[in-house]
Image (tube, grey):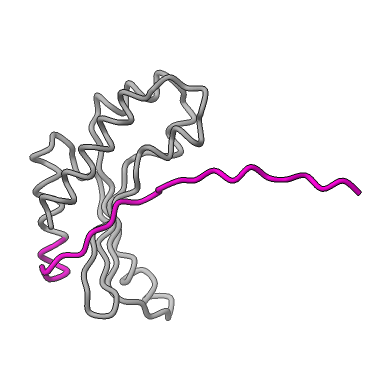
Amino acid sequence: MERHKQKKIHMDIDYTVQTNKSFDEAVESIALETEKAGFRVLHIHDVQDTLSKKGFTIEPLKIIEICNAKNAYEALQKNISLALMLPCKINVYEKNGMVSLSALRPTVMKNVFPDMDMTDLITEVDERMKEIVDKAK
């Protein structure tokens, strides 16, 4: 039996930093920096609350969905399947008393859709995401 080797793709899927802010201050700071960067907060998922209603206990975790309409429109014109990776997400979570800010890096799109010519847009959005996280820190 012939074994096929899977090609392993290296992906830095997240950009994560720790902050000295409280959990709630960090969430507010992400929202504020998102607006300053020309993006909009679409929704904030309170994962801790949702899971607690089902009897599961986790430390604080919120998933903040953000979007820039112009960038989203441009991406969707290239490939409607990109909608699977939209909107952009930034997580704020607490683990062992430390609060972290973590952005899903848009650069993963290049690995998922390698034949698509979107390097400039993806790089620009990736830099904005890192900037939001850094300034919110």
- From the viewer's perspective, is residue 57 above or below residue 92? below
The image quarter containing residue 92 is: bottom left
- From the viewer's perspective, is residue 30 above or below residue 66? below
The image quarter containing residue 91 is: bottom left
* Magenta stretch: includes residue 128: no
38 with respect to 121 (left or right): left
Residue furthest toward the right? 1
Camera-nearest residue between 57 and 13: 13
Residue 102 x/y as whole percent: 28, 56
* Magenta stretch: includes residue 6: yes
Residue 59 x/y as whole percent: 31, 76
Residue at image point 11% right, 46% down: 33
Residue 66 x/y as whole percent: 25, 43
Residue at image point 11% right, 41% down: 35
Residue at image point 43% right, 34% down: 83
Task: Considering the whole magenta stretch, tell me its main secondary structure.
Answer: loop
The image quarter containing residue 46 is: bottom left
The part of the chain drawn in magenta is 1-26
Residue 77 x/y as whole percent: 40, 18
Camera-nearest residue between 64 and 122: 122
1 with respect to 131 (left or right): right
79 with respect to 127 (left or right): right
The number of callouts visible is 0
Quadrant placement of the C terminus: bottom left
Residue at image point 27% right, 62% down: 62
